[in-house]
């Protein structure tokens, strides 16, 4: 019988860690990537990777607390067993990356140094300067290169995934891909296909994501029948450098190393920021969240920055929204050692030295918490059963999703430095289950009749040919992409309103209609980037629609999804009895909202390509949901009432040890 | 003439519109040009003749070469108004960390993303010139095949030879000064600038024969690569791993590679590599270290016989 063969699509952290583990377990892997895998978007991750470590453990930290911070940060929208398993694996994963040679920053005694990131009170984040993602990716790239030399891995770089191949029973048996140089098509029979294709930031035009992050691979799987979960949850990172071609990330580690966010109290104060005295500055995050300060979770920091600029009119500049991110009080030597990479980016692209002058930053689309729906098998201890073929498997048997393109780990909001962990974890952890699943398909994919693959090949060739001959259309794909990006940025980022979402949905449908009239300006069949872009633009519309529809239907505020019309007002009264009444009413509403909306959004692609949305219950059996206040000033009364209710109900677990937090109180 | 500018000339009508950016501060605010002229050396496919094509696009504050190329793709018209296929080029992260977008910009090898137009116009006010790298085979226009660069990493075994990915506790303790020594080397983005600038690194272009399978072609091509100079980036990576407590367990294998054909002896000490490295990696220091290590190792080999 033929050896099993696995096809991995995408060579970022998730795809490479899966490839490495599979090869090590004796499996032959085909690794397909749009770019040389060393150039994958994971290189852009800056700040670090979270895990409990020997130091934090002695300060009272544990895997359980990492798990708790993650689900609390995600506003409890995740199924809890996979998150628990990930937190449990954290220390082992960072140890492994350390062994692979990642140059983590060191303490004077030679141990790994750690810094604090958002949404936790512990210094849990190991880091390699401010290019941690790059360093992690390189070390995995090196190991996969080793396996390539051994002959276990075959790389297909500059190849595009076009569609999964399903057999009559609906099982994935491989994929159709296209060589982006010769434009030739090829069928890859495989006993399992793993998608590790990252996020979909390009739906928003400019974002912090790389140019390959179009979401097209995921969209193609979605149209082939894979479900998409929690699409409406898009992370907008609080701090990015606005640019004409890209919004470049300014890592959370800038705040982790002491960076302070502020605006002048006088709107558009024309003075040099260095000349503005302390008394005339508003450090609004520290003022509103004294406990977490500048390290509140990203959704909250983003909303506060957006709010201070738009509602309070305190943007630093008059014609452009931005606030100061100030590192000038941190010693230059510390900055160079711990943040060098990102400060150089700022200096290179803005021409200003952030060690001397406060940076000007503004939020930007950064991460897709949502992604392909994937399954898991829960263990008796509340984690996952290692080796189960259900882990990371989409609803299509034999088709898996890992890394940013799955929906599983970050709920309604991702904590900083958890993404690198979830990517590596899902890649390493899924491998034994994928192999077990290979046997479930009966005969090996290589023994399947070629007919199975020919229909997919023909469909893709036809789709491609149809685009190439469309040279006479009157629409420009780059122009349409810009319009889509502007629209999505306007209605589906920080603040969402139902009337805007309804209008935007219609507008996306009309953009999609116009896309059908797109002219390609290159009709050739050699390295035709024009037709590849046009194709991937077409794949953005189904995802845009499911994001908009999911956002429209979810009438609540949760993590990154914020609707002012459904925000829960904070406590305004000063009279103790009235305060109490307001807090009781608040907790009543919170409970009602939890009952109604603490559910995964699941989108299925309808016959006309329209999303059909349903909701699934979430496993919150390990940690009961609680209000998310993060020590907000004015939230104490709510906290008090909530604790009383939990005590009366006899639930709470560790929850009471953490600090309740709530994201909507700032409306 | 500029055509179809209305629809595509302005990047954003929204909140982050292109107002003069105080943070930009390049001193060109008074004399901001209306348009940017660019000439691009094009080539339709390997083996085809190359040719120049000129474009003119609207100037936007804080542009980089990527935004020029995005605009060139969007308008798909040459300066004289002819409809032309968009220029092909490589890019991904746009923040100088993925290493994709290397090209010759005004004759100098560098990354297109961090090449800011305002500064380029100081170099050559009339027209910006873009050419593909000359040391790698052109695939199309500004896209070149840098497979040789990654193959060099195989040659020098640029990895830590771990037993596997099972848990064995943390890696070795490392002194902060050793980490600080290694980290700059580890930031190499494989862009190829150091190879483009190196007089000893010459182009190797293999063309697949009709009677040859893909695997046969790859084997023949890699054999040709193995005879050529590995280049500064691979030497530096070898030194990175020879300095790592576990990596050095196969230090001799790396030195074998560095002292065989196409190895360190080919370096002519021109020091161009370090001058063009966008990440300011101390490449010449790595080369000097490799030279010393190779000498010591060669002597040791004689006495070990």
Image (cartoon, coloured by chain):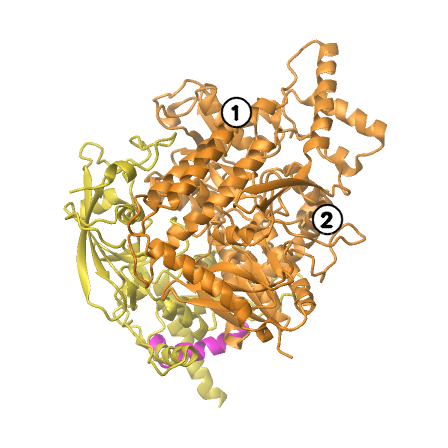
Chain colours: A orange, B yellow
Residue A185 image label: none
**B263 in magenta:** yes
Q: Which residues are magenta?
A: B247-265
Q: Nearer the viewer, residue A313 or A543?
A: A543
Residue A396 horizontal/vertical position (percent): 63, 57
Q: Tell me the residue at 66%/50% (across/down).
A: A53
Q: Tell me the residue at 29%/36% (across/down).
A: B10
Decide if residue B179 is in sight here.
no
Query: Which residue corresponds to mark 2?
Result: A81
B234, above or below A345, in the image: below
Distance, label 2 to label 1, CA atoms, is: 36 Å
For the N terminus of chain A, which image quadrant? Answer: bottom right
Q: Residues within 10 Å of mark 1 (few under 14, many from 20)?
A: some
**A21 in magenta:** no
Q: Disc 2 or 1, which lies upstream in sequence?
A: 2
* Secondary element type, mark 2: helix
A127, above or below A366, in the image: below
Q: Tell me the residue at 43%/48% (across/down).
A: A538
Q: Label the magenta part by its dominant secondary structure.
A: helix
Query: Which residue corresponds to mark 1?
Result: A284
For the C terminus of chain A, which image quadrant? Answer: top right
Q: Using the image, name the chain to which the residue with label 1 belongs.
A: A
Residue A204 horizontal/vertical position (percent): 44, 40
Q: Nearer the viewer, residue B217 or A299?
A: B217
């Amino acid at each position: 019988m033929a050896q099993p063969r696995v096809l991995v699509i995408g060579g970022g952290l998730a795809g490479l860690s899966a490839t490495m583990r599979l090869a090590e377990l004796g499996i032959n892997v085909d690794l397909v990537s749009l770019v040389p895998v060393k150039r994958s978007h994971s290189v852009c991750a800056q700040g670090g990777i979270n895990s409990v470590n020997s130091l934090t453990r002695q300060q009272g930290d544990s895997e359980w607390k990492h798990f708790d911070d993650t689900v609390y940060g995600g506003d409890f929208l995740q199924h809890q067993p996979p998150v628990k398993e990930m937190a449990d694996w954290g220390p082992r994963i960072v140890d492994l990356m350390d062994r692979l040679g990642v140059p983590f920053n060191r303490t004077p005694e030679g141990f790994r140094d750690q810094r604090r990131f958002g949404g936790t009170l512990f210094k849990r984040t190991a880091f390699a300067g401010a290019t941690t993602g790059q360093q992690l990716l390189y070390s995995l790239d090196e190991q996969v290169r080793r396996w390539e030399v051994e002959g276990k891995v075959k790389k297909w770089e500059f190849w595009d995934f076009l569609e999964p191949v399903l057999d009559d029973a609906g099982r994935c048996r491989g994929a159709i891909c296209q060589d982006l140089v010769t434009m030739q098509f090829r069928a890859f029979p495989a006993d399992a296909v793993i998608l590790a294709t990252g996020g979909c930031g390009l739906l928003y035009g400019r974002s912090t994501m790389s140019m390959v992050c179009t979401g097209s691979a995921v969209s193609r799987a979605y149209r082939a029948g894979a479900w998409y979960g929690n699409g409406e949850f898009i992370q907008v990172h609080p701090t990015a450098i606005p640019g004409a071609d890209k919004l470049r990330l300014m890592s959370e580690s800038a705040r982790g190393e002491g960076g302070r966010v502020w605006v002048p109290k006088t709107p558009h104060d024309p003075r040099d920021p260095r000349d503005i005295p302390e008394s005339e500055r508003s450090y609004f995050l520290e003022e509103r969240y004294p406990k977490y300060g500048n390290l509140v979770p990203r959704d909250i920091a983003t909303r506060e920055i957006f709010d201070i600029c738009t509602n309070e009119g305190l943007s630093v500049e008059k014609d452009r929204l931005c606030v100061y991110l100030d590192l000038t009080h941190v010693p230059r030597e510390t900055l160079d050692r711990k943040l060098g990479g990102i400060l150089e980016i700022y200096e290179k692209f803005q021409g200003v030295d952030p060690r001397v002058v406060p940076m000007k930053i503004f939020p930007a689309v950064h991460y897709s918490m949502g992604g392909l729906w994937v399954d898991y098998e829960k263990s008796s201890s509340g984690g996952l059963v290692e080796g189960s073929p259900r882990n990371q498997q989409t609803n299509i048997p034999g088709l898996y999703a890992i890394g940013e393109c799955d929906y599983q780990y970050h709920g309604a909001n991702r904590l900083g430095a958890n993404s690198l962990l979830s990517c590596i974890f899902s890649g390493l952890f899924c491998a034994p289950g994928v192999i077990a699943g290979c046997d479930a398909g009966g005969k090996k994919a290589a023994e399947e009749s070629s007919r199975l693959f020919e229909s997919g090949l023909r469909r893709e060739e036809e789709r491609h040919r149809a685009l190439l001959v469309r040279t006479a259309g009157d629409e420009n794909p780059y122009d349409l992409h810009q319009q889509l990006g502007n629209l999505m940025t306007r209605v589906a980022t920080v603040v969402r309103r139902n009337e805007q979402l309804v209008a935007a949905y219609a507008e996306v449908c009309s953009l999609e209609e116009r896309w059908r009239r797109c002219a390609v300006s290159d009709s050739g069949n050699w390295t035709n980037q024009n037709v590849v872009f046009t194709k991937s633009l077409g794949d953005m519309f189904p995802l845009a629609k499911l994001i908009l529809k999911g956002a429209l239907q979810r009438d609540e505020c949760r993590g990154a999804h914020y609707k002012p019309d459904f925000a829960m007002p904070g406590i305004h009264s000063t009279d103790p009895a009235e305060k109490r009444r307001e807090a009781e009413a608040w907790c009543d509403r919170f409970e009602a909202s939890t009952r109604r909306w603490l559910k995964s959004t699941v989108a299925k692609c309808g016959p006309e390509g329209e999303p059909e949305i349903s909701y699934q219950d979430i496993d919150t059996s390990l940690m009961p949901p609680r209000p998310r206040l993060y020590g907000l000033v004015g939230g104490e009364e709510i906290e008090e009432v909530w604790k009383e209710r939990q005590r009366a109900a006899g639930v709470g677990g560790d929850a009471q040890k953490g600090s309740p937090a709530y994201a909507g109180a700032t409306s | 003439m500029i055509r179809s500018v209305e629809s595509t000339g302005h990047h954003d009508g929204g909140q982050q519109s292109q107002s003069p950016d105080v943070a930009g501060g390049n001193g060109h605010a008074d004399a901001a040009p209306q348009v940017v002229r660019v000439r691009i050396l094009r080539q339709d496919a390997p083996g085809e003749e190359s040719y120049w094509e000129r474009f003119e696009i609207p100037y936007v504050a804080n542009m980089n070469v990527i935004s020029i190329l995005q605009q060139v793709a969007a308008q798909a018209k040459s300066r004289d108004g002819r409809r032309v296929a968009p220029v092909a080029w490589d890019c991904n992260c746009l923040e100088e960390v993925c290493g994709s977008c290397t090209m010759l910009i005004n004759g100098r090898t560098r990354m297109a993303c961090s090449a800011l137009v305002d500064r380029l116009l100081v170099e050559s006010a009339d027209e910006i010139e873009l050419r593909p790298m000359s040391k790698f085979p052109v695939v199309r226009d500004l896209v070149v095949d840098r497979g040789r660069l990654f193959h060099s990493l195989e040659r020098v075994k640029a990895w830590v030879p771990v037993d596997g990915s099972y848990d064995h506790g943390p890696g070795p303790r490392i002194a902060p000064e050793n980490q600080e020594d290694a980290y700059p080397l580890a930031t190499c983005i494989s862009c190829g600038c150091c190879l483009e600038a190196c007089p000893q690194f010459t182009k190797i272009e293999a063309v697949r024969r009709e009677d040859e399978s893909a695997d046969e072609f790859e084997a023949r091509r890699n054999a040709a690569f193995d005879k050529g100079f590995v280049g500064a980036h691979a030497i530096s990576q070898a030194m990175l791993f020879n300095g790592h407590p576990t990596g050095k367990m196969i230090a001799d294998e790396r030195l074998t590679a560095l002292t065989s054909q196409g190895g360190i002896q080919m370096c002519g000490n021109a020091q161009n590599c370090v001058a063009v490295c966008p990440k300011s990696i101390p490449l010449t220091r790595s080369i000097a270290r490799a030279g010393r290590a190779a000498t010591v190792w060669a002597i040791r080999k004689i006495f070990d016989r």
